[in-house]
Image (tube, grey):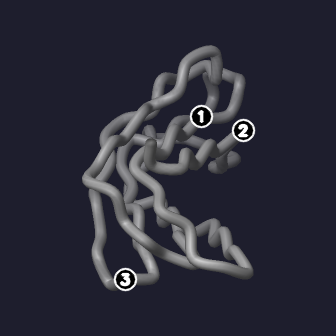
Amino acid sequence: MLRLCWRTHQTISRVTLFDRPNNLDQITSGMLVFSDGSTLTTGTLPDDAKQGLETTFPPKTVNWLMFVITGVKPGSPNIGLAEIQVFNAQ
């Protein structure tokens, strides 16, 4: 689980998740949880961190978001993200 918090509310509309840069472990599913009470499920992240999994949604005004890992590739020894990007709504 990873939680990002902001001091003021942010209006966001896109999150990109990057898996760890190796072929040993991989996130196969997850959930984004937002401070407004909404959630979004995510699919499998590309397994090399060269490309991220982009999730777009209607603008949300929040002061935190959480990413919860709900599934991993069998035998994954070290689960985590290399990077997370959160984008303000345009």
Q: Is 11 left or right of 18, judged from the image as shown?
A: left
> Where does the image place residue 2, in percent across and percent down from the top left?
63, 66
Mark 3 and mark 2 lie on one chain; the one further toward the N terminus is 3
Q: Is 47 left or right of 20, judged from the image as shown?
A: left
Q: Counting other residues with Cα less than 10 Å from the Cα at mark 2, is it few (<14), some (14-19), or many (20 or more)?
A: some
- Viewer-side label of 1, 3: 3
Tag 1: amino acid: Phe
How many marks can you see? 3
- Which of the image's four quarters has the C terminus? top left
Q: Residue at x 69, y 74 (%)?
A: 6
Q: How far is mark 1 from mark 3, CA to CA?
A: 24 Å
Tag 2: amino acid: Ala
Q: How far is mark 3 from mark 2, CA to CA?
A: 26 Å
* Residue at the outermost front position: 90
Q: Toward the viewer: 83 or 19?
A: 83
Q: How far is mark 2 from mark 1, CA to CA?
A: 5 Å
- Contact flag, marks 2 and 1 (Cβ < 8 Å): yes
- Residue 18 - label: 1
Q: Is 79 left or right of 32, judged from the image as shown?
A: right
Vertical comparison of 31 with 56: above or below: below
Where does label 3 land, which residue? 36
Q: Which residue is drawn at 34% across and 57% down?
A: 59
Where does label 2 land, which residue? 82
| Label 2 secondary element | strand
Q: Counting other residues with Cα less than 10 Å from the Cα at mark 3, is it few (<14), some (14-19), or many (20 or more)?
A: few
